Each structure stands twice: as structure tokens, then as C-alpha cells.
Image: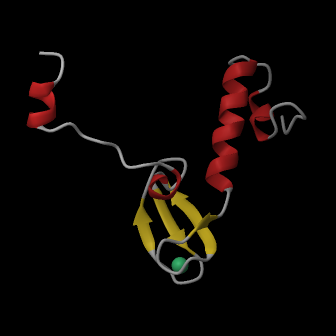
Amino acid sequence: MGRTKKVGPAGRFGPRYGTKVRKLIAEIERKQKQAYECPSCGAVKVKRLSMAIWQCRRCGTKFAGGAYAPSMLARKPVEVPGEKGRSEGMV
Ligand SMILES: [Zn+2]
């Protein structure tokens, strides 16, 4: 058990699940342990409390975001096509 050079903390899974899956897990875990910028005070102190819950260690702001990264900072907002967009589309 433990860390490996190739997949880091995901080395705890041993030879299970395959390299690709373990690499993906390593990537996700790296992201969720990272500190992120706070949307309210701007300090890079935001940590993941639990699934999709993030808290700033400086000003204490707690907010919901993505499961593995506070998506509002990392991702562009998703465009939801309305009724109008739908009728203009493939129909
Ligand atoms: Zn803050």
C-alpha cells in the first residue's frame, strides 16, 4: 500500500483497476486537494470540505461547487438551450 511514482496516492489501489483509471483518480485527487481562489476575498485558501462543498480558510465563506473542483472558477457556465433555441435547432 502507498504512493507510487507513476500514479501517486492512487498507488494505494495496488495493481487494481488498471493504469488508466488509477491515473485518472490521481489527477482528480490532485485537483481536489489543491487550494483554490476564494470568490469572495480572492485568497487562494479555498479547500474542499466534502463532496462539492468548499470553504475559504481566510474569510470562512462556504459554498457549493463542483465535486472535485469549485467549478464556478474553473469552468465556463453551461449554456442551457431554451425553448427558442430548441425550435431553431434540428427540428
Ligand atoms: Zn475568502
Residue 33 drawn above or below residue 86? below
User: Residue visible at 63% across and 72% down?
Assistant: 45
Q: Is residue 55 left or right of residue 32?
A: left
Does residue 77 lie above or below 57 as drawn?
Answer: above
| Figure colour scheme | secondary structure
x and y, in percent, of residue 20 in the image = 70, 20
What is the total number of numbered labels drawn onto the structure image? 0
Can residue 58 be spotted in the picture?
A: yes
Q: State the image quarter where residue 13 is shown.
A: top right
x and y, in percent, of residue 6 in the image: 86, 30
Where residue 23 appears, as percent x and y from the top left, is: 73, 29
- Left or right: where 28 falls relative to 38: right
The extreme front residue here reads 88
Q: Is residue 50 left or right of residue 26?
A: left
Determine the image quadrant of residue 64: bottom left
Q: Which of the 4 image quadrants contains residue 24?
A: top right
Q: Is residue 63 left or right of residue 46?
A: left
Residue at the image position 85 percent from the left and 39 percent from the top: 3
Q: Nearer the viewer, residue 12 or 42?
A: 42
Q: Is residue 29 above or below residue 43?
A: above
- Which residue is the extreme one toward the bottom? 59
How far across and down, in percent of the image, does residue 4 sit?
A: 88, 34
Q: Is residue 16 visible?
A: no
Residue at the spot 84% in from the left edge and 38% down from the top edge: 2
Residue situated in front as seen by the camera: 72 or 52: 72
Residue that appears at 59% across and 82% down: 58
The quadrant in which the N terminus is found is top right
Q: Quadrant of the C terminus?
A: top left
